[in-house]
Amino acid sequence: MINAKVIDVFLKINPKKYRYLKNTKIVTMRISSEITKAINDQISYEASSTYAYIAMGAWCERIGYDGSAAFFFEQANEENTHMLMFIHYLNKAGAEAIIPAIEKPQDKFDSLESTFQAGLKSEQTVTKLIYNLVDMADKEKDRAAYSFLQWFVSEQIEEETLFQTILQKFEILGRDKLAVYQIDQSLASTRTQVMAKKQIKNNPQSTG
Ligand SMILES: [Fe+2]
Ligand SMILES: [Fe+2]
């Protein structure tokens, strides 16, 4: 990444040696360092969420909760996509996206219900972080960031609702072995329904 002023300086020093710089893609920063830092923190959180959901999926798979395992692995894919969206956003805005180190996630759980409780808690944290980002963009009058973040605002409403709906099933059906088995089995279709809804949201034309 290099800006026009720097290229001019090099060309004045030694035009022959640095002539290749004339063809350099010029990127101008159009994002503040505060928002850049906050988005980099968000990249880190989305990466941690990806790993956290993979760990939940792996635990479910080991225990034999296949419906929930598939659900969490798909959830991990989504968090990975969120992380990439933030990375692309920073890089395209002329800032630098930092790829974070990730701590080992929790990989043991007391029950199937507790994995979904952990999921809901994490989604609630993300919602707060996204709202903070929106506030920051609003304060700085960064309209581009503000509009980019709106997608995440509605995404978080859906994510929280999804986890709440699943947790409600434990209240309704109970927590004995048969009930937990039924809830686990229902997870595969829950995920399919959510994905279908998201496809309509992201690509309204596909509905005809
Ligand atoms: Fe996310
Ligand atoms: Fe999420």
Image: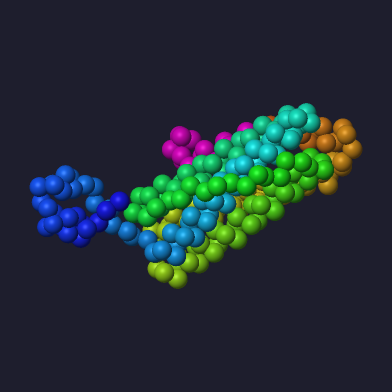
- Kindly tell me whether residue 193 is visible in this rendering: no
Q: Residue 22 or 140: which is nearer the viewer?
A: 22
Residue at 12% across, 57% down: 12
Q: Is residue 208 above or below residue 155?
A: above
Q: Give percent across and percent down for residue 184.
A: 76, 34
Residue at 72% across, 49% down: 118
Q: Is residue 200 magenta?
A: yes
Q: Residue 31 or 21: which is nearer the viewer?
A: 21
Q: Position of 167 compared to 196: left or right?
A: right
Using the rendered view, name the quadrant where residue 33 is placed.
bottom left
Outermost residue toward the right in this view: 176
Q: Is residue 33 above or below residue 72?
A: below
Residue at 83% across, 36% down: 180
Q: Give percent across and percent down for residue 195.
A: 58, 37
Q: Give percent across and percent down for residue 26.
A: 24, 51
Outermost residue toward the left in this view: 16
Q: Residue 107 or 155: which is nearer the viewer?
A: 107
* Magenta stretch bounds: 190-208
- Kindly tell me whether residue 20 is visible in this rendering: yes
